[in-house]
Amino acid sequence: MNKLTSLLELQNLTAGYGQTPVLFDVNMIVNQGDMVGLLGRNGVGKTTLLRSIIGLNKLSKGNLIFDNKNITKTPTYKRSRYGIAYIPQGREIIPYLSVLDNLKLGFSAAGKSRKRIPSEIFEFFPMLKEHLSRQGGLLSGGQQQQLAIARGLMCNPKIMLLDEPTEGIQPSIVQEIEDTLRRINQEKGITVIVVEQKIDFVRQLAKKFFIMDKGAIVSQGMTPELTDTLVNRYLTV
Ligand SMILES: Nc1ncnc2c1ncn2[C@@H]1O[C@H](COP(=O)(O)OP(=O)(O)OP(=O)(O)O)[C@@H](O)[C@H]1O
Ligand SMILES: [Mg+2]
């Protein structure tokens, strides 16, 4: 596929909770192979945006195009099957299930009945192989995040949506997660949208950035254009 083919398009996406609007006419184009950082202060709507893309929040207006299909009304499980993986904020692994069973949940998201974990999962996350029978809840925060990313990879996604994957994680593991996401993007060609508060993380990892404020995209560009002026205006508290 041509590198500049658009994979995901948000057209005037408008959504909220009940009567409370949160997102206002969000337009966004993400191309095949992009590595995108989505930035914004607390409460501006980043999580709501990712949830709308995977279908956990209903749109009140607008369209969503993914891989040349209009998925605006497509249920979440089908969006997963089409190749959208969502790694939620707070990771949401199942604490009392083993690492292996947590990984296998990734198969059901993809609607596949495969039984064996592909070896490349352990190539990306060698740590998981050593802890397969351990309860997910006994892993460290960083290990749980790696498990959540691995689970997302199990369905062979075309795009991965990650919500603050480094939140509350120690710096050495943050670096590991950065390296892994870079490999997933470069070696597997998977498009990535990562919501982040850490500006340095986005500057090092992402190729493009979008900044949200009050439910709208207020700035976007290539990462070198993410200037301190923008950071001070929209991102520092
Ligand atoms: N389940 C919900 N019900 C009602 N309002 C909600 C719900 N979840 C979020 N909101 C509101 O929607 C707005 C956007 O929240 P959202 O979680 O999308 O922001 P965010 O940018 O991800 O914030 P953070 O950086 O804190 O994760 C906030 O005003 C929040 O209070
Ligand atoms: Mg959030």
Image (cartoon, rainbow, N blue to C red):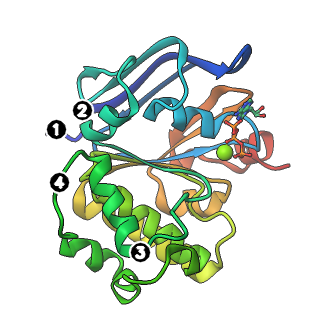
How many angstroms separate mark 4 from mark 1 (CA)?
31 Å
Mark 2 or 3, nearer chain start: 2
Is 48 drawn above or below residue 94 in the view shown? above
Question: Mark 3 sits on what residue?
Answer: 99
Amino acid found under the numbered disc labelled 1:
Asn
Question: Mark 1 sits on what residue?
Answer: 2
**Disc 3 + disc 4, Cβ < 8 Å:** no
**Disc 2 + disc 1, Cβ < 8 Å:** yes
Q: Quadrant of residue 217?
A: top right
Q: Is residue 119 left or right of residue 180?
A: left
Question: Mark 4 sits on what residue?
Answer: 113
Q: Can you give x and y, in whole percent of width and height, for residue 180 in the image?
A: 39, 70
Crowding at dot 2, Cα within 10 Å, few <14 / some 14-19 / many 20+, comes out as: some
- Foreground pick, 112 / 128: 112
Amino acid found under the numbered disc labelled 2:
Thr
Mark 2 or 4, nearer chain start: 2
How many angstroms separate mark 1 from mark 3 (CA)?
37 Å
Q: Secondary structure at mark 1?
A: loop
Is 1 drawn above or below residue 105 in the view shown? above
Amino acid found under the numbered disc labelled 4:
Ser
Q: Is residue 236 left or right of residue 50?
A: right
Question: Mark 2 sits on what residue?
Answer: 5
Crowding at dot 3, Cα within 10 Å, few <14 / some 14-19 / many 20+, comes out as: many
Mark 4 or 1, nearer chain start: 1
Q: Can you give x and y, in whole percent of width and height, for residue 210 in the image?
A: 56, 38
Residue at 18% across / 70% down in the picture?
116
Q: Residue furthest front?
A: 96
Is 32 drawn above or below residue 98 in the view shown? above
Crowding at dot 4, Cα within 10 Å, few <14 / some 14-19 / many 20+, comes out as: few
Is 51 drawn above or below residue 202 in the view shown? above
